Amino acid sequence: MIKKAIIFSCLLFLTSQICSAQIHINDGLWRGVLTLDVKKQIELPFIFNVYYADGAPSITIFNADEKIVIDEIEVKNDSVFFQMPVFDSEFKCKFFPGLLQGVWINHSKNYTIPFSAIFGQTDRFKPHVITRVDFSGRWETTFGIGTPDSSKAIGVFKQNKQILKGTFLSESGDYRYLEGIADGKNLYLSSFDGAHAYLFLGIMDEKGVVNGDFYSGLTGHEKFKAVGNNVFELRDPYTITKTVKGEPVNFSFINTEGKTISLSDEKYKNKVIIVQLMGSWCPNCMDETAYLSTLYNDYQSKGVEIIALAYERTTDIEKAKSTVLRLKNKYGAAYEFLITGLSGSVAAQKSLPFLSSVTAFPTTIYLNKKHEVEKIYTGYNGPATGAAYTKMKESTENLLNELIK
C-alpha cells in the first residue's frame, strides 16, 4: 500500500509538472476584444503583444503611439491573470491554445466586462471596403446630442491610407490615444489603457458631417456629431476655474507615509508651488504626472515645489495610499503626494474653499512665492494632442520662469 501511494503521489506530481509546462501563452501579436454590450454585440478591440524575457511573459498594449507594458502576470494551471500598471484593474482569463477567454475587472468603477483574445489577428478593426473618405483634420464636436449634459470638444485626426489616429480635446482633458480605421464613409476608433475603454463608431453623411456613437466602459453611451472646423476653439483653460475672494490658500492632508503635510510648512515657504488636483484612476492625471515629474527635476533647484492632492475613489486610506504609490513610483515622481480621503469634484471644492468650483481632474493651481493664486489650468492636453500638448508645456514653463524671478 505504501509503495502504491508513493507511485500515485509521483504520478500526480509529474502530471502537474507536465500540465504546468504546457501552459505557454503564444508569443506574438494578439487581438483583444472587450464586449461592452453582449446583446447588441458592441465590441471594443485592441492589439497587444506577448513576449518573453528570462522565461517570464510580458504584454505590451498598443494605442496609436502609446505602448503600455504589463509585467505583473501570473500563469496558474490553465488560468492567466494580469494586473494593469498604475490603474486598479485586472484581467482574469482561461487559456486555450491561441485563445484567451475571461473578464476585465475595473475595481475603481466596480464593474466587469467580458474579454477574449485571439492569437495572430493583427487588424484592430476589420475593413470591408477599399474606397474610403479622409477623416484627417480638425473637427468641432458635440457630445451628448440633445441632452442637458451636452459638451463641446475638438477632434484632431490624421489618416494614412486606411489607418486613422488622433484624439478629442475637451475642457476637462483629452481622450488620449485613439486608433482605428476609415472604412468607406465609416469611422472606427478605440482605446484601452486600463482605466478607460473608449469606442467611437461614426459615419459621414453627404454634407461631410460625422454622426456617431461614443461608448465608454460598461455603461457610458452618448451620441456625437462632428463638423469640420479649423477655427473653432474651446474656452481658455486658464479662465474656467475661479478663486473665491478673501479665502486664504491653505490645506493639510497626510502623505503616502501617513505624515501630515501643510502648505504652510517650512519646506514650502517662499517657494513657487504647483498644486495638482488628481486621482490615480484618471488617465489624464497619469499623463500630467509623467510631465510634472520631469518638470520637477528641472525646476526644484530653482525654487519650485509640487504638491499632488489625490482624490481617490475609495474611503479606505490604505488602499488609496497603495494606488497612489503605484502611480508615483511608475513615473519616479519625487514630489509630495497627499491623500485627501475624498473623491469627486464637489468634495475637492469643499476641501479647498478658496476655489469657486472644481470641474475637472486634473486641475492645476500655480501659486507665487507668497502662495497667492496666479493661474489655474483646468483639464489637461496630453501627448496625444500633439500641438496642443506642446503649447501647454511652453505656457507652463513660461509661467514658472516668470514666477521664480
Image: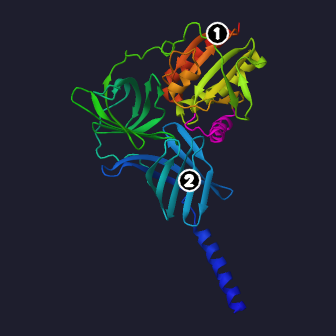
Q: Main secondary structure of the magenta part?
A: helix
User: Outermost residue, bottom direction?
Assistant: 1
- Mark number displayed over residue 50: 2
Front-most of 10 and 137? Answer: 10
Relative vertical location of residue 380 with respect to residue 220 in this rendering, above or below: above
Front-most of 301 and 350? Answer: 350
Q: Secondary structure at mark 1?
A: loop
Q: Quadrant of the C terminus?
A: top right
User: Outermost residue, left direction?
Assistant: 206
**Hey, which quadrant is residue 261 in on the image?**
top right
In the rendered structure, which amino acid carries the disc numbered 2? Val
Labels 2 & 1 near each other (Cβ < 8 A): no
Q: Earlier in the sequence, mark 2 or mark 1?
A: 2
**How many residues crowd around disc 2 within 10 Å: few (fewer than 14), some, or many (20 or more)?**
some
Where residue 87 appears, x then y in whole percent? Answer: 57, 41
Q: Which residue is mark 1?
A: 372
Where residue 34 appears, x then y in whole percent? Answer: 42, 49
What's the magenta region?
312-332
Distance of label 2 from label 1 (alpha carbons): 50 Å
Residue at the spot 55% in from the left edge and 37% down from the top edge: 313
Residue at the spot 51% in from the left edge and 43% down from the top edge: 62
In the rendered structure, which amino acid carries the disc numbered 1? Glu
Give the mark toward the camera: 2 or 1: 1
Residue at the spot 69% in from the left edge and 8% down from the top edge: 370
From where the camera sits, is residue 391 visible? no
**Hey, which quadrant is residue 77 in on the image?**
bottom right
Q: Secondary structure at mark 2?
A: strand
**How many residues crowd around disc 1 within 10 Å: few (fewer than 14), some, or many (20 or more)?**
some
Q: Is residue 330 magenta?
A: yes
Relative vertical location of residue 123 with respect to residue 230 in this rendering, above or below: below
Q: Is residue 132 magenta?
A: no
Where residue 263 appears, x then y in whole percent? Answer: 70, 19
